[in-house]
Image: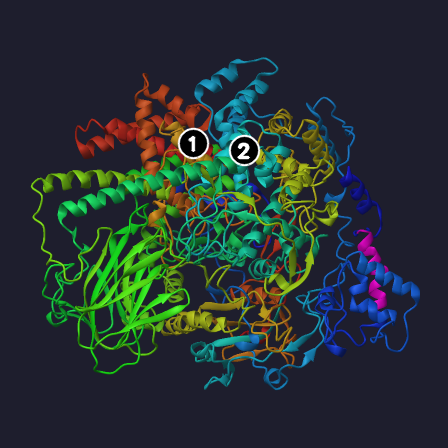
Amino acid sequence: MWTSRPSRRQAIRSMVAGSPLMAGILQPLLARGGTATGDALAPRSPPSTPKAKRVIFLFMTGGVSHVDTFDPKPRLTSDVGKEVKLDHPEIKDRPGYERIFLKKPQWTFRPDSVTGIEVSDLFPHVRGCMSDIALIRSMHTDHSNHYNATLGMHTGSFAFARPSIGAWVSYGLGTENNNLPSFVVIAPAQTYAGTQVYASDFLPGAHQGTLVVPGAEPVANVRPALPTNQQLAQLKALQKLDGRHLQARGDDPALAARIRSFQTAFGMQMAVPEAFDLTRETDGTLNLYGLGRGQTSGFGWQCLVARRLVERGVRFVELIDTGSSGNWDSHGDMMDHERLARNVDRPIAGLLRDLKNRGMLDDTLVVWTTEFGRTPFNNTADAKGREHHNWAFSSWLAGAGVKRGTAYGATDEYGMRAQDNKVHIHDFHATILHLMGFDHERLTYRHAGRDYRLTDVAGETVRGVLA
Amino acid sequence: MRLSIAWLTVVLLPLPAISGPAEDHFENTIRPVLAQNCQKCHSDKKQQGGLRLDSREALLKGGDTGPALVPGKPDDSLLIKAIRHTGDLKMPSSKMLPAEQIAHLERWVRDGAVWPGPAASLPGGNVMAFGKDLWSLQPVRQPSLPVVQNAGWPKTAIDRFILARLEKEGLAPVGDADKRTLIRRATLDLTGLPPTPGEIADYLSDNSPDAFARVIDRLLASPRYGERWGRHWLDVARYADTAGDGADYPTPEAYRYRDWVIDAVQADMTYDQFIRLQIAGDLLTNPQSTDYASGVTATGFLAVGKRYGYAPNGDFQHLDIADVIESVGRSVLGLSLGCARCHDHKYDPISIRDYYALYGIFQSTQMSFPGGEEHKRPANLAPLVSPSEARRLDDEQTRQFAAIRSEVEKLQALRAQLDGSEWAGGPDLGFEGQASGQPPAKPWLSQGPNTVIPDAQSPFTHIHPAGKQGVRMAASVPHDGIRMVLPRPMRKQSGAKMHLAIDFRTLAEPKEPGACRFYFGRGVIESTAIDFSISTNQFAIRQADGWKVLRTIEPGVWHSLAVTLDPESGTIHGVVGKPGDLTTIQGTIQSTWDGVIDTFICDGLGHLPGRVCTHDLDNIAISQQPLGKFGGPTVSRPPPLPDAKDRIAQVDATLAGLKKKQDGLANRKPYPMAYAVAEGKPTNAKIQLRGEPDKLSDEVSRRFLEILGGHKVSSGSGRKEMALWLTDKQNPFTARVMVNRIWQWHFGRGLVATASDFGTRGEAPSHPELLDHLANQLVNSGWSIKAMHKALMLSRVYQLAADPSPDQQAKDPTNRLWGHFQRRPLDAESLRDQMLFVSGTLDLSRPGRHPFPAEETWGFTIHNPFHAVYESNHRSVYLMSQRNRRHPYLALFDGADPNLSSAGRLPTTTPTQALYLMNSPQVHQQAGAFAKRLLAVPGDSPSRLRLAMEMTTGHPPGPDGEREALAFLEQSRQKLAAQAGNNPDTDLQAWTGLCRVLLVSNAAMHIE
């Protein structure tokens, strides 16, 4: 079942099933032979028992400096200004970068009182949660361009449009709430790779991420314009019409995705306002996220809404902290990191604590990552910024199935290259899928004559971060 | 011709010679000499004598003994003197250079000391060596038509290319689309609107072989065509109606460019001309001709991008220019030139020198400024009349303005007489109306310890009548003071004199060293007529050579100053003093004075520095009527005129009219303006290291890309020449890129899938021969886009059915081989326009400018940015498209992101779109209008249903569909009637429900 979707028709059949609205389409399809395999988004059990039932994926846009946050490198401080020679992609043939020098971190690292894991003062609140986190200090990726690296972290492909990790998880597990999308992206602005970071690409359209932009009305037009019975009658008429249209057109998945979108939208009318309504949250909870009552934006809002969405069965929630500008891309001045960290540190810690208090951290996986790290060097010793760095960066996993309170892997003395227990983004993806109960080599989709998977032809589950 | 030769050089040589003779001379002879003999002691490692000899700049700067180089003058250049070993300075000191090398260096300096290649800190330029095999760089070939097995299948040459490839892969094309599908496809494709049932019927009944060709001709002639295909270009041109900086200022004139594009496309302007005008229309049209306005408007292409900066100055200009270079590169050439801004392009043969050569062209171009945080108004808009006509109209307006102003001032003077506010000493500058014990209030401005008190009343009554109070200005710092602006300015007039007066006294205690000044002039020290000054015991006047103390004054005693200015002779005369002790004043007015007095200031900036003593002022007078003389009769207020009230009302009415006219003139240019570009000061750019404008390296001459010949600019900005280079027939990119776009807009995807990236990072063409065949055809047709439409649409490939065969699904699931037509969702504009069109509410007129707030009211900042969504029933191409906050509908349905040149739409299918289709008021309104329209047509429900289906989907309902739809209608009627009783609207509501279903059905929302 997880190896391929051999026929277009079968894919469609699965997509349109499982809803009171779908009878008009389902019946004729069934009449043409075969039985429905169920709704593409119906909840499913993965091949092996999963540790995590849902994911909250926190993406820091622009490239967070590992040596200023989660990867302490005292040698950078003691050897500051030392010239180094490297064959680095960001300095190759770059004017003004004939010579490069070590640059020291600008923030102090301190050990977490429980685990002793050192985290810098940029993330004091997250530091307090290290006992729930498996930190990976040996991440590396293939590209030092924002676009490619962002795409890589989301889709496993550095150049081509491929389904994003959220779409893969949705495809593998469906949703536990038919009235909400299985994959929701909450982002104030688009990342460098635009909509591709949450696209379903060749996977059925139902698995595409639904974009929510923080604000007073995060999902527009969600209020029904008609009494329910009238609306339902019209939607049924629409589905009959579209169903016949679809049958006559070889069950084109793009057409089926549109049909499906109406079904989800119908349910969203009730489910969304409830999910986004924070009025019933206690002051204590709001405070955990650093959120004021009535506030409808900011990363704290994104985090709290994420908790409410996964609570209601959404399978994969991605939170994007900024967008393709005003982000962690601190070429000009690393002090920018301070503002950006302040924006997310307390909300992230609040999310972890809140999930834990509710017992949800045992089956919810929280992922924190960025597209790449930042150079431990620059072209002058006193340069204020850092450049893109794909040789090493830090990410972490928290919660379900994770070996908590561990720091895994290491970079070299200057944080230049991942050295011990290196984790490529394919390994990272394989590990996330493993925690969801999947063998990353077997969660595939047949497309254009080939079985595609999130991890392309590579990736190994990182056992060292598993509980 | 020049281009083609250079072109061959690039293509044929293994390592292309990319530089001219001067550059070669330098690289082959000069650089090695300098490197081997001089740079050991004079470069970045060592600078003996403070001198570096590793860049031209360094030579020009020289060392301790001055510049080492005077380009063009070997005999004056220290470098040459030194190597000749003829003077005191002998270099290299160890040995003399061989005579041949000295001669080379002399020649090099004589020829201007050309130093190509970036400074020592830039990488050596082998960037051009790689990427030369890039397919898109090769000249467009004339491919022969391929042989196909199924010779009966192709209708056109295009078909043979497509079929040959399909056959090679063992695939066959699917069957043809039916006629209804085809006419809907063609109509939506060319006009963005669905065919009407009448148009469908005409086509169905036309059985002639050229029936479809006639449909195409009809559609190409429709004004709807220009709107549809103009929109395609506007995607590429990153068109928006706001500037996109943090405050997102509106660009109200941008619509002219939008309309220009639509008109040019509609008229089938040849594509080369279309491009040329957008680059340099202002330079390629005669300013005296009727084409000029259109030419200027076309250059809006360069200006309409995302803009940076807060004021119309050079700050952030490099980012504006970066946008222009990137947009021109992507749109016309399919090259991402922007990658060479900080370094040589990593993948394509574009060097950083190329980039800054183009940069110079746009730096020499003045772009309209949209308004920004610091300068909240547009600037440098381009007049749509010739420069001479603009001057004439500007002058005419200035004259009109002056005439109105003079009339206004006459009436104001009359009003002042009538209302008694101006008599005796002129406008009443006294303090009688002020609250006692308070600082002077309106119309005065006061800063510091100034109080209106009875104790400061002057005893004199020869200019103003006896009053009750004056102002006391207690001892204070020099910048404290009081200021008053006159209600109407006093202007220099022939034969008229100006009279000024003031009564004052100083108080001895507390003792302060400074002096206070009386300023009379225009504005706040903008143009001084005359300054006087008093310290505790001196009176002074400022003359051309400085302050002159005229007399002493007695602390505690009131003095009076009265002077008359003669603006014609520039002289001033009068008296100052106290009764029985008057001093005559004879002097000159400030020579820089512009003839206007509208402001009086008393501050502490008098003839002596320091804190100012306490002083009292009263009876200030500024008048064109002679003032009373010292010792003359006591003045008293004249009685009001009997009919004053009525006359004042009359005057006020006339004044109000004039004021409106005046404001109108002040805020409007007397000719239309465009948001476009004009020639600036021709200047070469310096390379910006890492793209940072403050890290400058070598200057680069303005020229075209090396890979396209590298031609130099001869004069002006170079835009005019660039326009020609871009559209040279030998340029291998321009035609290929455009035919690929046209293919993409017809078929959903280009032969090159990355329509704006023909570089090494883009995708290679699926059918390279076909691409070249079409590129040739475009050029040979005289660059006619309409001819290209016809060629593509008359091909059999275009007319195929939309569903793949099982074979195709298996072997070519993404339809790269075009074995079937690619079904695609309607884009945002077509979807909306179709709804408006079938519901009969589409306004097909052209709306012109958007209803932006008036410029006078603009105060947008990043914290208070411009934001608006304007309701409209016009075609979607005319919707106001905002950059920072996208139009909600266009954003939801994947409209073009106007922040960058957009290669194509990336359609998505989301539940949030479904929510819009289900619940938005817009869709409900259209469904209601559609239902009304249907009910207005005579007939029964089945005939109306048929009509509705044909209008929305192009097809009548099948038997099942008809039965179900009619049943839905009937059930709706019954349910509604049960709920609402005998509501006459029941039928309308039932139909509205059905229309809503039809409008958002997949059949309506897709083109196939």
Quarter of the figure that contains the N terminus of chain B: top right
Q: Is residue B190 above or below residue B304?
A: above
- Disc 1 marks which amino acid? Gln
Chain letter behind tag 1:
B
Q: Is residue A306 left or right of residue B940?
A: right
Where residue B245 sits: x, y (%)?
Answer: 46, 54
Depth order, front residue of B592/B35 = B592
Q: Is residue A357 visible?
A: yes
Disc 2 target residue? B292
Chain letter behind tag 2:
B
Where residue B867 sits: x, y (%)?
Answer: 37, 50
Disc 1 target residue? B834
Q: Is residue B27 magenta?
A: yes
Q: Is residue B511 above or below residue B793?
A: below
| Quadrant in the rendering for residue A92 | bottom right
Secondary structure of the residue carrying tag 1 is: helix
- Disc 2 marks which amino acid? Tyr
Depth order, front residue of B421/A299 = B421
Q: Nearer the viewer, mark 1 or mark 2?
A: 2
Depth order, front residue of B178/A122 = A122
Depth order, front residue of B101/B465 = B465
